[in-house]
Image: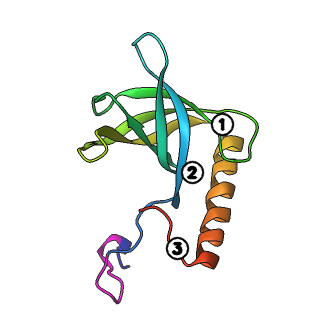
Amino acid sequence: MIDPSEVTAKNGELPYRRRYVRVGVDAPVTYEREGVEGPKDGRSSDLGGGGIRLSTSEDLPLGSVLLLRFRLPDVDRDIVARGRIVLSFYNAEEQRFFHGIAFTQIDPRDQDEIVRYATAEVQRLALEGETAAD
C-alpha cells in the first residue's frame, strides 16, 4: 500500500495533508491560557474543522492549552473550543505572533458548523478563482 505522505502531485508539490481544509477568516477571538488569569483578545487568520491560526500581541509557549471563544461570519452564537498550540512564529512585518492551534475539545455541532463554513467558503473562492488558506 502507498503511504499518501510520500506521494507528490504532478507539479512536484506535496499534496494537501491536513484532515480538514482551512480557509482564511479574519475575526476576533477571545482566548484564555490554562492556568493564567483573565481573557485576552486576538484575531483568527484561518480556520478549519481541526484548528485555528490565532494572531496575538504576545508570544505563547508551544504546548500551551487555550480556551477559545469566537464567532463564524453570519453566525449569531459563540463557538467555544479548547486547543493546544502546535506551531508558533513571529511575523515581523505585522509585528504579531501567530499560533497554530489544534482543537482538543470542541462540541461536535460546532465542529460541523466550522466544516460547513469552510466548505462553503472553498466553493465560493473556487467560483471567484481564489484559493483556500494553506
> Relative to residue 19, is residue 72 depicted above or below?
above
Q: Which residue is mark 1?
A: 107
Q: For the residue marked with disc 1, what is the amino acid? A: Asp
| C-alpha gap between disc 1 and disc 3 | 30 Å
Mark before the other along the chain sequence, 3 or 2 = 2
* Residue drawn 49% across the image and 59% down it: 19
**Image coordinates for residue 118, horizontal then vertical, percent:** 61, 58
**Image coordinates for residue 131, horizontal then vertical, percent:** 50, 71
Q: Are marks 1 and 3 in contact (CB under 8 Å)?
A: no
| C-alpha gap between disc 3 and disc 2 | 20 Å
The residue segment tinted magenta is 5-13
- The quarter of the picture where the C terminus appears is bottom left
Mark before the other along the chain sequence, 1 or 3 = 1
Q: Which residue is mark 2?
A: 49
Numbered disc 3: secondary structure: loop
Front label number (1 vs 3): 3
Numbered disc 2: secondary structure: loop
Where is residue 54, by image quadrant?
top left
